[in-house]
Image (spheres, rainbow, N blue to C red):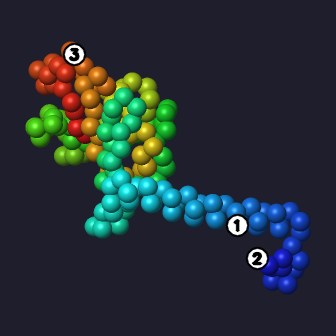
Amino acid sequence: MSDKVEGTPLTKKQRKKLAQKKKQKELHAIVSKVDGYIRTMEGGINNKDKAIVGARRTIGGVKVHDILLGEGAIVRPGRKVSILYEGSFPDGTVFDKNHDRERPLTFRQGTGQVVRGLEVGLESMRVGGEREITIPSELGYGKKGSGNVIPPNTTLIF
């Protein structure tokens, strides 16, 4: 790191700012390597998309499998979320989907507008990502089910 920019000496404030940027870049590189190593150990590398993918369980037993990691903003509580989805049962039977519709499902994360398991599964996802979320019945529709479409005590996959 040089203390001069185009022949002009840097002020103390400028040197401090440059040092902070350098430390941030070094820290980001270390975190990326560690995160990449952990994700690689969990799920391998998806060579088609050149994205590191992996599967993990979250609070309540929701299983999350990242198929493609997005590069946009992270989903946070209170923020508006728009998703394209396909809901199915473990046997592969599709009960609902909006991939064919013109508009995605839009809701505010963490406000209870969708089943709790879907909200848990979307946490920490990035815009542009693709994820498979397996929801145990307790965080889906539970003992009641949902009309004639979703039977009681059924695991859901989105």
Q: CA distance from mark 3 to mark 2?
A: 63 Å
- Image x and y of residue 110, in percent: 44, 29
Describe residue 85's horizontal placement relative to residue 31 as left or right. left
Disc 2 residue crowd, few under 14, some 14–19, many 20+, Cα 10 Å: few
Quadrant in the picture for residue 132: top left
Q: Position of residue 113 (x, y in %)?
A: 36, 26
Asked whether the residues under the numbered discs 3 and 2 touch, taking CB atoms below 8 Å apart as contact, a structural biologist would say: no
Q: Is residue 12 rendered to the left or right of residue 135? A: right
Q: Nearer the viewer, residue 27 or 99?
A: 27
Q: Earlier in the sequence, mark 1 or mark 2?
A: 2
Report helix, strand or loop for mark 3. loop
User: Circle 1 is placed at which residue position?
Assistant: 22
Looking at the image, is mark 3 or mark 2 earlier in the sequence? 2
Label 2: which secondary element = loop
If the image is split into quadrants, where does the N terminus sit? bottom right
**Mark 1, secondary structure of its residue:** helix
Is any atom of residue 49 visible in this view? no
Q: Pointers 1 and 2 in contact (CB under 8 A)?
A: yes
Q: Which residue is tagged 2?
A: 1
Contact? badges 1 and 3 (CB < 8 Å): no
* Residue at the limit of the structure toward the front, as seen here: 41
Whole-percent x, y for residue 81 in the image? 41, 39
- In the rendered image, which quarter is residue 67 located in? bottom left
